[in-house]
Amino acid sequence: MAELALIVIAAALVNNLVLVQSLGVCPLFGASGRVETAIGTALVTGLVLTIAATLTHVVERYVLLPLEVPYLRLIAFVVVVAIAVRCTDAVARRTSPLLTQLLGIQAPLVTANCAVLGVALLNSTASRSLVAAIFYGVGAALGSCTPTCRCRSAAPRSHS
């Protein structure tokens, strides 16, 4: 359990995707001028990061490696990320109209966030177990959400 806690802390603070590895900086600079939308975007991105980390691990271990086609990893991961984003968007639309209204067009744009694909590839390169991959996804989600929300809350507000 201590190893899993260290994975989360390392992903969130030490190897932060946004601040250290410069992955997923798009929402940091231009996601929204409103704090509420930035929080919604950060939550959806965090959820997709965790789901994509899990699904890409499963696809790699139980589809790509047994079929001996690891060279299709990038293509498979892009497809899995797109499916994860689409499913998350569909669930958000059905369960939370407020979140859907806050996000607007930004939920499908999470597909283009390189941090999501980056987490999948980093998990694959590190050969983590499924549980460790999930915890790395959670840590990466925490690490990428914090700067996004913090920058939006510190940004000057326009009085229009």
Image: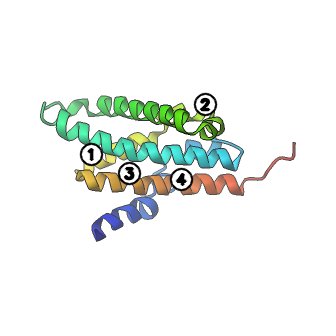
Name the residue rendered at 57%, 43% in the picture: 41
As drawn, the label of residue 145 is 4
Q: Which amino acid, mark 4?
A: Cys
Q: Which amino acid, mark 2?
A: Ile
Q: Nearer the viewer, mark 1 or mark 2?
A: 2
- Write down the residue under mark 3: 137
* Cα distance in 3D space between marks 4 and 2: 18 Å
* Cα distance in 3D space between marks 4 and 1: 22 Å
- First along the sequence among labels 3 and 4: 3
- Write down the residue under mark 1: 124
* Cα distance in 3D space between marks 3 and 1: 12 Å
Could you tell me if residue 7 is visible in this image? yes
Name the foreground residue: 12 vs 100: 100
Q: Which amino acid, mark 1?
A: Ser
How many residues crowd mark 3 within 10 Å: few (<14), some (14–19), many (20+)?
many
Name the residue rendered at 27%, 43% in the picture: 57
Name the foreground residue: 116 vs 134: 134
Q: Nearer the viewer, mark 4 or mark 1?
A: 4
Q: Quadrant of the C terminus?
A: top right
